Amino acid sequence: MDQDLPWKRSADRAEGARARAVLLLKDPARAPSVEALVAAGIEARFDSADIAAIAEGAGILGEADALVVEIAPGDARAMEAFDRLVHLAAGDTAVIAVVDGLTVADTRALLRAGAADALPLPFAPEELRQALEPVRRPQRAPAGRPGAAEPSRQGRIVALMGVLGGVGTTSLATQAGILWSDTAKVCLIDFDLQFGNAALYLDLRPSLTLGDLIADYERLDAELLQSVAMRHASGLSVIANPVDINPLDMVSIEFVDRILRLAAQSYDVVLVDLPTAWTEWTIRILERADIALMVTDLSVAGIHQARRQLEMFEANNLIPKTRILANRVQTNLFGKVDLKDSEGVLGRKIAYTVAEDAATMRSANDEGRPIKEIKSGSRIAKDLKALAEALEAVPVAESAVRS
């Protein structure tokens, strides 16, 4: 009876109720506390049942939204039990795998086995919350089964490139991505292999990164792409830059073509944060983008470098899709911005401006929060909203590589 099983799921559970998870871990001390999980919106309890016993039909199935199961992918017997468990739970309870020393190969093997998600051990409450989020919607079919493929979509690709380091390109990318996530499924890919900070600015500590996708290029598909993307509380998905500083030539044009095609099929909007470097593959990304944002400030150095960069955009036939964004713009007493001199030097109009507010942006980056939460109604918050709305109006280009 339901009163004897307080955890048993109910079809009429209130919208927004806490997700319920049963955690099957060898050492519960490696998991967040029950209190920390409750604070993250998760109603959790630990269970000592053996995975093999559950896979034989133990009654724990159906009592929660998900089972969070510790598994060693290299253990054939454990994987056999995990496979039985996933099949037994199908359509009733999601199974989330947790792995000590999780790798891309582990993630792929577990997703192929039908896991709803795979997390590193130890994991943070927010990571589990994000993994549990989809269980309230119809679960995706395990890979290799009917219905596994996601519907094709043609997401908008926006590439951002700073004219020099320190002009705030990544800050703009993360904040625009947060805003855009209110109305769309958005992914931010940090292609700055050497100095990327997108995940850091969102207060995320991903266990898998763009480097793992590059290393596993031959097996890269939409499922693997989305498993590496980490979710911010806003809903924004982020594929972080590699942990180690890497040479720019580790990226191939073939990899760029594949990841952009898969991302555009999986998300409504794909934001690409580029390094301040001209290579074959950065040019390829700019070619595949629907819009290229060239980010500068209005300093002498910024305008000088912007003018030089425009020559490169023109040499690569990118001018029609290129828009200049002036960041950290000072306004006068009446809130006006004088761009006449800067535009005269550039020989082009500045399409977008974002006001100077270093303290607010620094707080947003340090805390991984939206600017609108830190200083709602501020000029910088209004400028960022206007930017996101303007980019949303950009039409999606038809391109063979993204079909």
Image (cartoon, grey):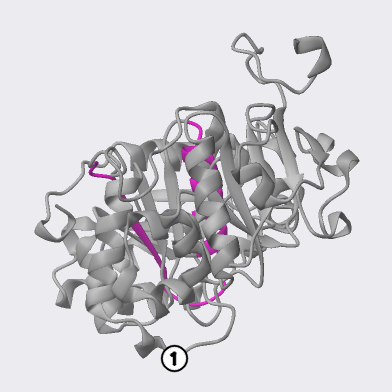
Task: Return the x and y of residue 27 as percentages of the image width and height.
Answer: 84, 59
- Which residue appears at 90% of the width and 39% of the height? 35
The reply to whether the magenta stretch includes residue 245 is: no
Please tell me which residue lies in front, 86 or 29: 86
The image position of residue 359, as x and y in percent, is 74, 54
- Magenta residue check for 161: yes
Q: Is residue 370 something that shows in the picture?
A: no
**Is 99 situated left or right of 44 in this image?**
left
**Residue at 53% in and 66% down:** 240
Image coordinates for residue 26, horizontal then vertical, percent: 80, 59
Q: Which quadrant is home to the N terminus?
A: top right
Residue picked out by circle 1: 247
Q: Quadrant of residue 67?
A: top right
Can see residue 56? yes
The range drawn in magenta is 153-182
Q: Quadrant of residue 349?
A: bottom left
What is the x, y in percent for residue 95? 58, 44
Crowd rating for badge 1 (residues with CA inside 10 Å; few <14, some 14–19, many 20+): few
The residue depicted at 29 percent of the width and 61 percent of the height is 260
Relative to residue 137, is residue 37 drawn left or right?
A: right
